[in-house]
Amino acid sequence: MLSIALSELVQLFRNRLVLVTSLIMPVAVSAVFIYQHEGFAALGSLGYIAAVVMFTVGAFGLYTTAVTTLASRRQNLFLKRLRSTAAGDSAILCGLLLPITVISLVQVAVIMTVLAVVTGEPDNVFLLAAAVLSMVTMMLGLGLATAGVTDSPEHAQVTTLPISLGTIAVVSWVGISGTEELTLLKRLLPGGSATELVLNAWNGGASLADSLILLAPTLSWVVVAVALASRIFRWEPRR
């Protein structure tokens, strides 16, 4: 698995499009939100800013890159060749997705640290870490499912749009309007409960028990996405 991951890391830094999408763009967007934090905090809250930058990395960095990577490796028959080795299916997928996952986690950690230095520390760091990990897990699951219906890296630019843009829209909706109204709908949508969890972790004001329950909808999306991926994910191109 580690050899696959190292090989994939090299490929990531050789692909300029992926490099811009997964590294530069999320950092640039996050920098804007942090620089203009007073205005965005007035619109929502500091927790809203934390949720937006977290999902910017998750949607446009992690999720989009995961789909593009798997579609590309399938198209050039690299997935097929890997399956002929001693590595199992899980090890192959973990190896391919490990580099961008680690990069995304580091990005989120650095961006959150900068935000905390500029605006003040979050109310509950451990709860914030739980929100980040649940988001990463959900986006990876959705990435696997989306890769199943993506024929090529170019096709990924289309197939990833609904979820990447949709999650950012949900984050903004929940982060700005809160969950006092349409609570169930907002929590069940992808990214909704994770956004509320970030709001609670950064802003405070909610009990630990009420916050931990918010992990359930996000993890449910992981189960649904993995179950869907197991049915539609392809290791070889369509003939």
Image (tube, rainbow, N blue to C red):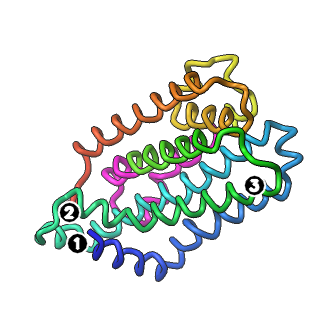
Magenta part, dominant SS: helix
Mark number displayed over residue 228: none
Q: Which residues are magenta?
A: 143-171
In primary-sequence order, the first of circles 1 and 3 is: 1
> Where does the image place residue 181, in percent across and percent down from the top left?
68, 17
Q: Is residue 83 left or right of residue 182?
A: left
SS class of the residue under badge 2? loop
> Where does the image place residue 66, in percent across and percent down from the top left?
42, 60
Residue 162 in the magenta stretch? The answer is yes
Mark number displayed over residue 77: 1
The N terminus lies in quadrant: bottom left
Residue at numbered disc 3: 115
Q: Which residue lies at the image location 58% right of the left edge and 42% below the top edge?
A: 126
Residue 21 in the magenta stretch? The answer is no
Q: Kindly identify the amino acid type of the residue bearing the numbered disc 1.
A: Leu
* Residues tagged 1 and 2 counted as in contact (Cβ below 8 A): yes
Residue at numbered disc 2: 236
